[in-house]
Amino acid sequence: MARKEKSKGINFPHVYIMFLIVMLIVVALSWIVPSGEYERTVDPDTGIEVLNTDKFTYVDNVDPISFMDFFTALHNGVVQSADIIVMLLFASGALYILETSGAIAAGIHKLLRVAAGKEKLIIIALLVLFSIMGTIGFGEGGIPFIPLAMAVVMGMGYDRITAFATATVGLAIGFTAGVVNFYTTGVSQTVVGLPIYSGLSFRIVSLVIFVAISIVYILRYANKTKLDPTKSIVFEEYREQLADNKEAEYEEETLTLSRKIALLGLVGVLIGSAFGAIKLGWGMPELSAVYAIYAVFLVIILRLKPSEAAANFGTGAARLLPTGLAIGFARSVMILMTQAKIIDTAVHSLSELLLNTGMVITLLVLFLVVIFFNFFVVSGSGKALILMPIMGPLGKILGINQQVMVVVYQFGDGFTNYLWPTSGGLMAALGMANVNYADWVKFSLKLFLLLHFAGFILILIANYIGLGPA
């Protein structure tokens, strides 16, 4: 992997330090924002905790955040994120077995030969593929595949930022459109009583629009930097990359029959995971099991030594440990906010603020609030369970139908998962891809502003047409 160059602009602190800073901000807010609670009941039909928006009370916080609470939140954040972390460890371990076997190198070299003269189409195809992964709910689950896509894009002569954007932006726009994303669309619609995945055609159109914007933006940067490498955000590294002739790394590997079967197995893992998540209700334990099965499959198909493969599995998993800690530390922010009991207070203040505003302003404020709230609570499903019980009844009061409120939530939630520094998934992906956060912001900020603008226009359209069912 290429060395990490210094950012030419703002130098952000290490991701762990950034999380500690945000946690300190939460502690400070806990002394300023009064604690409050909504009455909560459990819906016997769905098992989902429902907030009674008519019963909010300010309370004395009898359990203020102590010195030890601050640091135990780090441990608890990792523990509460264990299902995601373990799945990523299993995925990274299995993929490292595939990598050390030479199958990935052989497959990439073959693809590079086929891609000669079709580089732009390959970028578009990869972005569309990752957007499909995102739209079925692959957030952190898509991270292990990012380095594979990057190897292809960089092998075609593009810089690291183009390669990272091709995969990551694909996940972002797919997850945001949420065509069949249970973590945002599914949970949100269930909370407000809508048929799950209703409004499908609108979300598909939204996805197409997001993909089109992203393709134009990424290809514009890719073409510009390939014609003039000095315009690359990571110019120093890019210059070394071009001089090294990355394609040569894969020339000695042969795509044998067993390697073809191993790579087809990887496609099967992706398809099987998607099918299981959508149709069978699989969660992280089942997805982890799929990667464990794939690791055993590789040992058999590639005739690997079991002990050597097991060691490689451990090595591959170890590479993702810093990433796993980042995801856990991100969760710690939510733990402290819950302990301080300031989440319900913020939501209550929002509901009072919007009662006497116009429709467009109301939708804009709701959209911006979800975007802002996502800085502190990145989890799509977790945030849906906090906000949708408020946004649903609020929509009824304000004359906004429930489907539109779900769209507001989705579009406000998804994009900033790949922009806010408190996103454990983003920091994990940046770490795996060896991309500096400041460089990523420099590239992606304008794109995400465009996508948010398009998202808000779509929200207004959804409200205008009365997107149903209501």
Image (cartoon, rainbow, N blue to C red):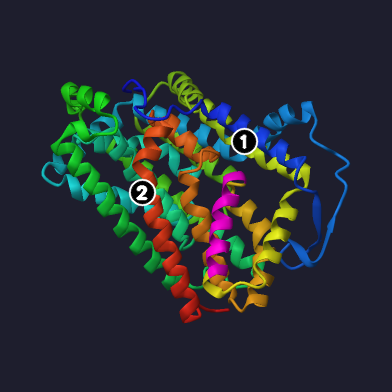
Disc marking residue 428? none
Residue at 25% from the left image edge and 54% from the top image edge: 216
Secondary structure, magenta segment, majority class: helix
Does the magenta-highlighted stretch encompass residue 374?
yes
Front residue of this view, candidates 435 and 350: 350
Residue at 52% from the left image edge and 64% from the top image edge: 364
Q: Is residue 350 left or right of residue 423?
A: right
Query: Which secondary structure, mark 2?
Result: helix
Front residue of this view, candidates 412 and 167: 412
Q: Residues within 10 Å of mark 1 (few under 14, many from 20)?
A: some
Total labels: the figure holds 2
Asked if the residues shown at circle 2 and circle 1 are in contact, with their CB atoms under 8 angstroms apart, the answer is no
Q: Of the residues shown, which amino acid type is indicated by label 2?
A: Lys
Residue 332, image x and y in percent?
A: 66, 36
Q: Residues within 10 Å of mark 2 (few under 14, many from 20)?
A: few
Q: Of the residues shown, which amino acid type is indicated by label 1?
A: Val
Residue 239, image x and y in percent?
A: 20, 25
Residue 357 position (above or below residue 285):
below
| Distance from the alpha carbon under mark 2 to that under mark 1 | 24 Å
Query: Which secondary structure, mark 1?
Result: helix
Q: Which residues are magenta?
A: 361-376
To which quarter of the image does residue 194 belong?
A: bottom right
Judging by the rendered image, the residue that carries numbered circle 1 is 22
In primary-sequence order, the first of circles 2 and 1 is: 1
Judging by the rendered image, the residue that carries numbered circle 2 is 446
For residue 26, say whether it is visible.
yes
For residue 280, say whether it is visible.
no
